[in-house]
Amino acid sequence: MINLKVQSALNDQIKKEEFSSRLYVAMAIWCETKGYPGAAKFLFSHSEEERMHMLKLVHYTNDRGGKAQLAHIEQPDDEFSSLLDVFEKVMEHEKYVTASINSLYEVTVHEKDYTTMNFLQWFITEQVEEESLFNNILDKIKLVGTDKAGMFHIDKELDGMAVAPAPIV
Ligand code: FEO
């Protein structure tokens, strides 16, 4: 059974993952309307991954005798100056999520909730992978600069990187 402090911290993270899902839809919409269909497909699929993260936390909270709670979600920004701007903001957001997962982990350490500590290992690894993925994408976008042919190629590459999310476990 999780205690109320851990439950509250898990619910905070649920809100952040749900916001991430919504933010990436807002970014995907921008990409789709600005002529980057591949980036849009990638971000739509990444939004689904964030929803999967949210549900993973929801199920865990409920399974441990707690109660997951949905919260009011702020309106995400939906105006960007370039594809580089979009992915710089994705990176910034993922760093924020990593810091948030680390804070959640600290709560579980403080509360000696070893089961939740173990559960959070998946998220810690996931954040390392996500930051690395977005760093690679950012490097490529920076490399081509404003070259139109290069941007076209990156958009195609992002199209191929869109993945169906793994089932929630
Ligand atoms: Fe669920 Fe991209 O962090």
Image (cartoon, rainbow, N blue to C red):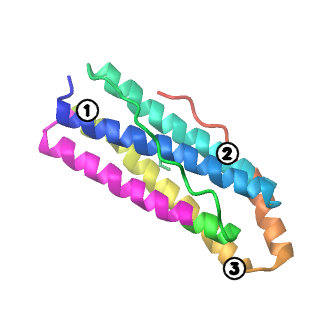
How far is disc 1 from disc 2 in space, using C-alphas?
29 Å
Q: Which residue is mark 1?
A: 7
- Give the quarter of the figure containing the N terminus: top left
> In the image, is the residue at mark 3 within 8 Å of ligand 1 by its beta carbon?
no
The location of residue 124, given as percent across then percent down, is: 37, 49
Looking at the picture, tell me which residue is in the foreground, 123 or 99: 99
Q: Which residue is mark 2?
A: 44
Q: Classify mark 2: residues with Cα within 10 Å, few (<14), some (14-19) or many (20+).
A: many
Q: Is residue 161 visible?
A: no
Amino acid type at circle 2 is: Phe
Q: Look at the picture and state if 115 lies above or below 124.
A: above
Q: Which residues are magenta?
A: 89-114
The majority secondary structure of the magenta stretch comes to helix
Mark number for residue 143? 3
Q: Look at the picture and state if 163 lies above or below 116.
A: below
Question: Which marked residue is nearer to the observer: mark 3 or mark 2?
Answer: 2
Looking at the picture, tell me which residue is in the foreground, 89 or 135: 89
Does dot 3 land on a helix, a strand or a loop? helix
Q: Is residue 75 visible?
A: yes
Amino acid type at circle 3 is: Leu
Q: Look at the picture and state if 149 lies above or below 8.
A: below
How far is disc 3 from disc 2 in space, using C-alphas?
24 Å
Q: Could you tell which of marks 1 and 3 lies nearer the N-terminus? A: 1
How far is disc 1 from disc 3 in space, using C-alphas?
43 Å
Q: Look at the picture and state if 84 lies above or below 59.
A: below
